[in-house]
Amino acid sequence: MNLLIAGVDEAGRGPLAGSVVAAAVILDPSKPIDGLRDSKKLTEKKRELLFDEIKAHALCYAIAEADHEEIDSLNILQASLLAMKRAVEALVIQPHKALIDGNKCPVLSIPSQAIIGGDNLEVCISAASILAKVTRDRQMLLLHEQYPEYGFATHKGYPTKLHCDAIAKYGVLPIHRKTFGPVKRYLAESLL
């Protein structure tokens, strides 16, 4: 019997807005997918193509998140681990083991192993990285439609000058992470 290994990764720890998104993927060894690597090392177009291929050929996958309110109440690390736990628990096929990108594992009912740089070392983690990143980027595009003046399509919620200038000019949105430095500073200054 083949061991079923789930690769797990998240996207969106650094941004000032939106959810942190995690994915868990069990690849099908009989249907290898070419080009899997860390999502940050792929073009947006390549990520989109691989996103569809992973969903079509994986044995199973799940995508989950922790929203901005959970990030603010737990902290970003704990929210990331929570999103990863939710993704693994949402898999319709129970894996024997989970390989987690990073240096910490969420609390799971199955054995897990943290692998620093795992999204470049294990194809199952690469696949999870791609699903998480594309899902989060798509969420940011929807937020851009809702709040075009903030430029979410360009910076995806990261603390760029454009984003920080928009916060200074237009204020903090409900989807901003209130505990993150630039947002927290703006809120503190607005009380003065």
Image (cartoon, helix red, strand yellow):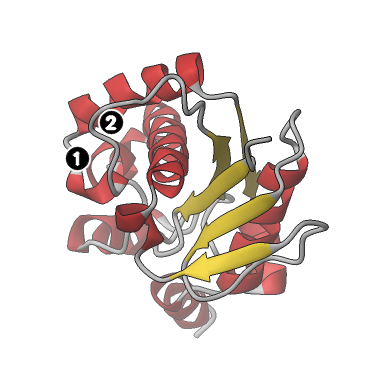
Give the residue at the far front of this rendering.
1
Residue 49, quarter of picture: top left
Q: Secondary structure at mark 2?
A: helix
Residue 66 lies, with reference to residue 95, above or below; the image says: below
Q: Residues within 10 Å of mark 2 (few under 14, many from 20)?
A: many
> At 46% across and 21% down in the image, what residue appears?
30
- Point out the tag, 2 or 1, that comes first from the N-terminus: 1
Q: Are marks 2 and 1 in contact (CB under 8 Å)?
A: yes
Q: Position of residue 128 (x, y in %)?
A: 47, 42
**Residue holding disc 1:** 42
Left-right relation of 35 to 87: left
Q: Residues within 10 Å of mark 1 (few under 14, many from 20)?
A: some
Q: Residue at x 63, y 69 (%)?
A: 105
Residue at the limit of the structure toward the top, as seen here? 56
Q: Secondary structure at mark 1?
A: loop
Of residue 136 and residue 120, the one placed in the foreground of this image is: 120
Q: Tell me the amino acid under the disc marked 2.
A: Arg
Tell which of 69 and 3 is nearer to you: 3
